Amino acid sequence: MNIAVISYSFTGNNDALAGSVAKELSSEYFQISESKPRTLSSITMDMIFSRIPLVQPSPNVLVKYDLILFFGPIWMGQVATPLRPYLKHLKTNPNKYVFISISGGADGPNTKVPGELRKRTGADPVVFIDLYIADLISTNPKPTRKATSAYKLDPGDIKQLTSIVVKKIIDVT
């Protein structure tokens, strides 16, 4: 099976996990880039106004793959905007896809994301994996947004999370 891994990461955590999974699955790996540096202000404005940014590589790179793995954060309960051009591409060029996120989790689960993915792509992902930094941090006291936002995955975290993701991907391939 020809698998593409596409990732966007504001903090580096989703990119680190995506790179590890791509290596484990011997898949082609693409990191999303934008022409302008992303700020907390631009994140907020994109979420409020549902903007879709210009990104590289072009979403057209997806056409030659049998399965696409998307890795990216959840912002304000929604898929990070740099992933939106690729999701929009899937709506007119249907393909099997997986969505994986490692995000803060201090505010609880991202329950609306599967519905958003369905709306943006026209189909449910074959696998949805929602991982949380809060689960990697000591739970006493309860992790704060500040703590989860500042957390960087270490090699042990990456190895553990890669194993979880790869097992679920292998089950659908």
Image (cartoon, rainbow, N blue to C red):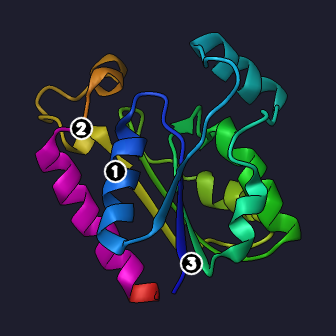
1 and 2 marks in contact (CB < 8 Å)? yes
**Which residue, given by chain and number where applicable, does mark 1 sit on?**
17
Determine the main secondary structure of the stretch shown in magenta: helix
Find out whether residue 106 is within the magenta segment: no
- Bin the neighbour count of mark 3 within 10 Å (Cα to Cα): few under 14, some 14-19, many 20 and up: some
- Up/down of 38 relative to 17, above or below: above
- Up/down of 33 relative to 114, above or below: above
Q: Residue at horizontal 30%, vertical 20%?
A: 150
Q: Residue at horizontal 81%, vertical 33%?
A: 50
The x and y percentages for residue 164 are 26, 67
The x and y percentages for residue 136 are 19, 42
Q: What stretch is highlighted in magenta?
A: 153-170
Q: Residue at horizontal 61%, vertical 17%?
A: 37
Q: Give the mark, 2 or 3, whose residue is nearer the N terminus.
A: 3
**Residue 87: quarter of image:** bottom right
> In the structure shown, which secondary structural element does the residue marked by tag 1 occupy?
helix
2 and 3 marks in contact (CB < 8 Å)? no
